[in-house]
Image (cartoon, rainbow, N blue to C red):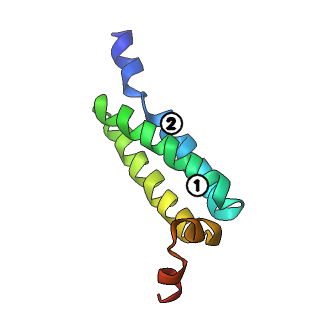
Amino acid sequence: MVELNQQKGIGVMADIIACVLAVLGILFLGFIFVPIAAIVALIGTIIAIKNKNIRGIGINILAWVLVLVGLLTSPMLLAIFGLGTSAATL
């Protein structure tokens, strides 16, 4: 019974860390925090899907949205990926 309760929270901590890193990437140094947030979100996604943790998957969707916003609001990351010209046309 204790093992089942511990399994419910698996993947949520990585998702929360990814959300915090993505928000830091949006507000401060995006070229540092956004890639780290993407890596942590990927790890959290794999863990949450593997364990069928619905709450973890939900928080992970938020983390991926924040990572995408952080990517689109960071001029340096856009330049690295070559998306600066496409962002200028929007």
Query: Which x, y percent locates residue 86?
Result: 47, 82
Instruction: Describe residue 88's horizontal placement relative to residue 26 as left or right.
Output: left
Q: Residue at x 51, y 72 (%)?
A: 82
Q: Secondary structure at mark 2?
A: helix
Query: Which x, y percent locates residue 81?
Result: 52, 66
Q: Amino acid at mark 2?
A: Ala
> Height in image: 1 above or below 51?
above
Picture quarter containing residue 27?
Answer: bottom right
Q: Amino acid at mark 1?
A: Val
> Height in image: 69 above or below 38?
below
* Residue marked by disc 1: 34
Instruction: Describe residue 61's horizontal placement relative to residue 25 as left or right.
Output: left
Image quadrant containing the N terminus: top left
Query: Which x, y percent locates residue 4?
Result: 33, 16
- Kindly identify which numbered label has been placed on residue 84: none
Q: Residue furthest bottom?
A: 89
Q: Residues within 10 Å of mark 1 (few under 14, many from 20)?
A: many
Gap between marks 1 and 2, in whole Å?
14 Å
> Height in image: 12 above or below 8?
below
* Residue marked by disc 2: 14
Q: Earlier in the sequence, mark 1 or mark 2?
A: 2
